[in-house]
Image (cartoon, rainbow, N blue to C red):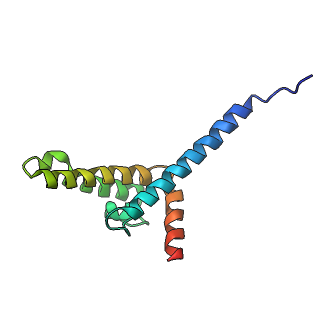
Amino acid sequence: MPKETSRRTPAVICAVVCVLIVFIYIWVSAAAVATAPGANATHYDVLNTTVNASDAELRRAYRRVIRSYHPDKWQRLGARERAQAERRYIQARYSYAVLSGPQRCQYDMLIMNATSKK
């Protein structure tokens, strides 16, 4: 008789795949920030906050940065300035997505590893 597969096997595989996807996402985002203009900028630098910021402080910093680079504020400027503001706006949203989620701890570990190698 063939062995019965556990009902939990698909759930375990799904959980492992999800963890791997999150890890790859954080790794790629850290690499993207490291290769962006201002190569030493972290997601914390983008939001003008520190690694020790609480969730509430992080949210306030995000809102402050988003307000200053919101597309509605840049309508009267030239195309180059609007494009730069849009890049910063998108970068701030991305940084907040990384830092406000459960992957923040993993991102902090990546930063610590990167700074210890320098």
Residue that extends furthest to the left in the rendered view of this protein: 76
Of residues 22 and 78, the one nearer the viewer is 78
* Percent coordinates x, y for residue 4 in the rendering: 84, 26
* Percent coordinates x, y for residue 9 in the rendering: 73, 33
Please give the name of the residue rendered at 38% of the width and 54% of the height, measured from the top-left corner: 95
Please give the name of the residue rendered at 53% of the width and 51% of the height, measured from the top-left corner: 24
Please give the name of the residue rendered at 30% of the width and 49% of the height, measured from the top-left corner: 90
Q: Residue 49's quadrant in the figure?
A: bottom left
- Compared with 111, 23 (above or below) is above
Please give the name of the residue rendered at 34% of the width and 65% of the height, measured from the top-left corner: 45
* Percent coordinates x, y for residue 106 in the rendering: 54, 58
Of residues 83 and 19, the one nearer the viewer is 83
Position of 105 with respect to 52 (left or right) is: right
Residue that extends furthest to the top in the rendered view of this protein: 1
* Percent coordinates x, y for residue 80 in the rendering: 15, 54
- Compared with 111, 1 (above or below) is above
Residue that extends furthest to the right in the rendered view of this protein: 1
- Please state the total of marks drawn on the protein image: 0
Query: Where's the N terminus, which quadrant?
Result: top right
Position of 69 with respect to 46 (left or right) is: left
Of residues 73 and 77, the one nearer the viewer is 77
- Compared with 88, 37 (above or below) is below
